[in-house]
Image (tube, grey):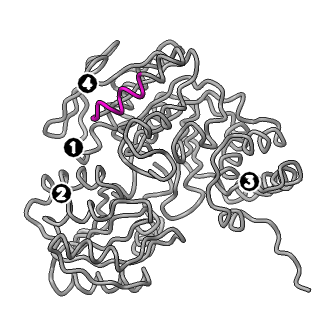
Amino acid sequence: MMAKKPLSLESLERLGWRFGLETTQILLAELGNPHLGLRVIHVAGTNGKGSTCAYLASILRCSGFKTGLYTSPHLCDIRERFRVDGEWISPRDFKRHSRRVLEACKAVRKKLGHFPTQFEALTAIGFSWFQEQQVEWLVLEVGLGGRLDATNVIKTPEISLITPIGLEHQEILGNTLGEIATEKAGILKPGGRAVTLQYQPEALRAIRQRAKAQGTELWESDKDFTYKWSKGRLTWEGLGLKGSFKLADLPEYQAANVALAIAGIQLLSPCGVNIAPKKIQQGLSEMSWPGRLEKIRSSPLTLVDGAHNPDAARALTFSLKRKYPGQKMIILNGFLKDKDFSACAKILAPHAALAVVTHPRSDRFVGGGEVVKAWEKAGIRAFWVGDWRQALEFSRSLVQGSKSPLLVMGSLYLVGACRKEMVGNRGLAKI
C-alpha cells in the first residue's frame, strides 16, 4: 500500500478554481483572521491590475510607508506574489507560513469536506505574512472576478480601484461587459471610496450602479480627473493635484495605469495620506513591472509581453507602432482556453513576420492546432511546437536566421517560463 503524499501547495493547485468566500473565511479564522487588521487598497479589473498595483505600492513606499504588495499570477517564482517594500518574501518565511497555512487547510477539510484551492491558500499566506510584517498599507490585487474572489474577504478597504473592463472568463463572469463589470465591482463595499477608469460605457454603467447601491463614493476618469500622455510625459489633473510627470520609457498603454494609480493616491487623502508630487514622481520612476513590453535583450531584440486578450493585444500593437515602427517580429505565443486567441492573432498580424505556437505551462492551455489556424486565417505563416522550451529554441534560431526581433506574448505562464529560461530572475528581486 502506497503512503499518502503530504499536502502541499502543488497538490492544491490540481483542485483548480473555486468561487465563493466561505472557504477562505474559515481558513483565515483558523489562522486568527490576520486580514482584519490590515489597511487595504483593493484593485480589480481586466487589464492593468498588476501594473496599477505596482505603481501604487511604489509611490507609497517612496513616501515612507511600509507597503505590502500581493499580485498574481507570478512570472518566474511563486514568491514574487508577496512583496514588502518591493522585496519578495524570503524562502524561510514562505516555507514557514506555507506550513502553517497547510495545517489550517486540513482543519478546513474536516469542517467543509474539501481543501482550499491553491489560490485561497496563497491568499492566506499573504495575509499572514503581511500582518507579521506589520505593513502600513497592503495593495491587494484581485485574482479573478471580484465579488467571489478569495481576496474579497476583507471588510471595507480604504479605497478600491477598478481598471478597464474587457471580455474575459465569460464562462464564469458573464457574457457581456456589463455582467463582467458587475462581478468586478463586487469589491465595492458600503461606505467605501473607489476610483475607476473605463473605456466602455456599458462597463461604467454597471460600476456606477454597484457604487450607488453600496453607498460607495466613486471617482471617474474624464469626470473627476483627466490625464494626457505626450512625448514621455504624463499630465494629470484632478481633485487636489495638478502635475506633470516624466516617464520617458513608459509603454503607451501603461499611461492609463499610471493615471489610475495617481487617482488612487489622491483618494487616500481622507486617510491622512497626502503625498507631494515629487514623491509621486519618484515612485513612478522607480517602479518596474517585468513582462509588459519588457526588452530583455538588445541583440537580437527580444521582447516579452503578457498580452493575452484582445484589449491587451491592441494596447501592445499601439506601443509597437510607436517604439518599433515597421518591424516585423517572430511571435512566440500560447494561450489558455478562455482567451480570444483568434482576435489576438488578427490584431497582431500586421507586426508578425511569422508565428510559433506552443503550450503555456498550464493544464488549461488551448490546443496549438487551433491557434495555428487563427494565425493562418490572419494571413501569417505559423509553426506548431508542443514543448515550450523547444518552441523557444526554434524561435530563437529563426530570429538568428532572419534578423527579425523576437516577441514572446500571450499567457503569462508562457511569458514567465521563457523569460526565466533566457535571463533567469534578473530584474525581479525588487520592483
Q: Which mark is residue 320?
A: 2
Badge 3 crowding class, 10 Å Cα cut-off, few under 14, some 14 to 19, many 20 or more, is many
Amino acid type, label 4:
Trp
Q: Which mark is residue 210?
A: none
Q: Secondary structure at mark 2?
A: helix
Are circles 3 and 2 on residues that touch, CB within 8 Å?
no
Asked if the magenta segment contains residue 409, the reply would be no
- Apparent side of residue 424 relative to residue 298 in the rendered image (left or right): right
Q: Secondary structure at mark 4?
A: strand
Distance (Cα) linking label 2 and label 4: 24 Å
Q: Secondary structure at mark 1?
A: loop
Residue that badge 1 annotates: 248
Distance (Cα) linking label 3 and label 4: 43 Å
Residue 389 quadrant: bottom left
Q: Which residue range is magenta in the image?
A: 199-208
Residue for point 25% across, 40% down: 247
Q: Which mark is residue 116?
A: 3
Are circles 3 and 1 on residues that touch, CB within 8 Å?
no
Distance (Cα) linking label 1 and label 2: 15 Å
Amino acid type, label 2:
Leu
Badge 4 crowding class, 10 Å Cα cut-off, few under 14, some 14 to 19, many 20 or more, is many
